Image (tube, coloured by chain):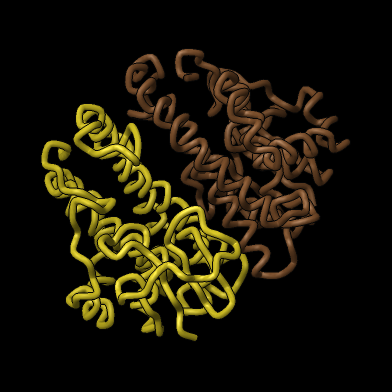
Chain colours: A brown, B yellow
Amino acid sequence: MRYRLYYWPEIQGRGEFIRLALEYAGADYVDVLRQGGDFSFPKKQTPFALPCLVAGKRVISQTANILLFLGPRLRLAPRTEAGRLWAHQLQLTVADWLTEVHDVHHPIGSGLYYEEQKREAKRRAADFLAARLPKYLDYFEGVLASANKGYLLGRTLSYPDLSLFQMVTGLRYAFPRTMKRLEKRYPRVIGVQNRVAQHPRLKAYLGSKRRIPFNKMGIFRAYPELDG
Amino acid sequence: MRYRLYYWPEIQGRGEFIRLALEYAGADYVDVLRQGGDFSFPKKQTPFALPCLVAGKRVISQTANILLFLGPRLRLAPRTEAGRLWAHQLQLTVADWLTEVHDVHHPIGSGLYYEEQKREAKRRAADFLAARLPKYLDYFEGVLASANKGYLLGRTLSYPDLSLFQMVTGLRYAFPRTMKRLEKRYPRVIGVQNRVAQHPRLKAYLGSKRRIPFNKMGIFRAYPELDG
């Protein structure tokens, strides 16, 4: 199966969570809009927003929903329904976290420029870094402590681990001072980040041109004035 | 199967999307914290936040994930994987929409009072009502137009229709002036709201004490200064 991923070609954004799963699994896929393709995918079950994955006749949207679909197919999720729902529950919590990261620099409106909401962004950043960021990190550290085998679901890596890798990597880029201060409290979360980064296929991907650099159009943005 | 729902007893909030599915289906359930129960549910696969559903040995969290689980069991989702993913995709879009409704009155931090972020809330409300609300309504109107059989997935009601009912009902409470102005453009969305409200079991539920009234602690809040 050759998967076709549709996502904005200039940013990692939400599409990166799909790219990481496809790359880690060594799946056959086309990142259509980065490879000169256009938006001419079937418009049935029309997406509200990208990313959108086309798999044969299937057209699937919403990041977590795409991963729900891909998980068992890429061997990145358990076989049992209970295991798949637990992986998905973790993924949906990552999705909430990511939305909060986005809203740090866009607290008023996603259609406005950052410069138009800078003052509000400073207030939101202070609240996010003091209250919400530690709450999410505490949560995932606790899940890893309960599982106690190195990955969120236990001994075997699943797609939420790849997403946790992306969160830590993005947060380090966006909030280097705060992350430096916080990281020592979260050895298990940082352990997942390290191990994913060292996986041979992921390492090759991260060093390739397929990995779009972080930038000031994406979800993770390095505005020093927002970093505590 | 007797389901046990754990959610804050003072508000509709995210729990209401689960309550509506259980009530519509005539399921056997206990709304534990409203019926004098406490938080002593099994803490395995620990939730980041409520709602949490206990079903036998299963403990499931994240609203959309709970509905993914309940959908086929309550006959509120299609049997096929493709149909279930499409229903879930719509539910995840409702979840994004609901988060934006919440952030209208809490653009800076969910741990702060509304009164501490009133000025920012006014700006965010203006953007939400002018840009985001019509975008979501357009989207669901379009899905209903494509399906062209009265409900989001076609002829048969599925759980995202119940969630769409709740969105319209809540938005009418929170933004009566704006909704009055907008509604005529969305006859199909309003049609779903009407038909769900008239369903015998739902009608009985909505008229009962089990339906918590809207209030200023929930997600939908009537602050006239935010209503356009």
Q: Nearer the viewer, residue A73 or B156?
A: A73
Quick check: A179 left or right of B172? Answer: right
Q: Quadrant of residue A146?
A: bottom right
Q: Nearer the viewer, residue B8 or B159?
A: B8
Q: Is residue A117 above or below residue B59?
A: above
Residue depicted at 52% across the width and 77% down the height? B55
Q: Across the whole image, how many numbered discs are drawn on residues?
A: 0
Q: Is residue B140 above or below residue B75?
A: above
Res. A97 visible in picture: yes
Quick check: B16 left or right of A128? Answer: left
- Return the x and y of residue B187 as percentages of the image width and height: 25, 57
- Return the x and y of residue B57 as percentages of the image width and height: 59, 77
- Return the x and y of residue B151 as percentages of the image width and height: 38, 67
Q: Residue furthest right?
A: A200
Quick check: B108 left or right of A56? Answer: left
- Return the x and y of residue A15 as percentages of the image width and height: 62, 37
Residue depicted at 80% across the width and 54% down the height? A156
Q: Is residue A3 above or below residue A214?
A: below
Q: Nearer the viewer, residue B161 or B187?
A: B161
Residue depicted at 46% across the width and 13% down the height? A225
Q: Quadrant of residue A75?
A: bottom right
Residue depicted at 77% across the width and 49% down the height? A150
Q: Nearer the viewer, residue B79 or A136?
A: A136
Res. A60 visible in picture: no
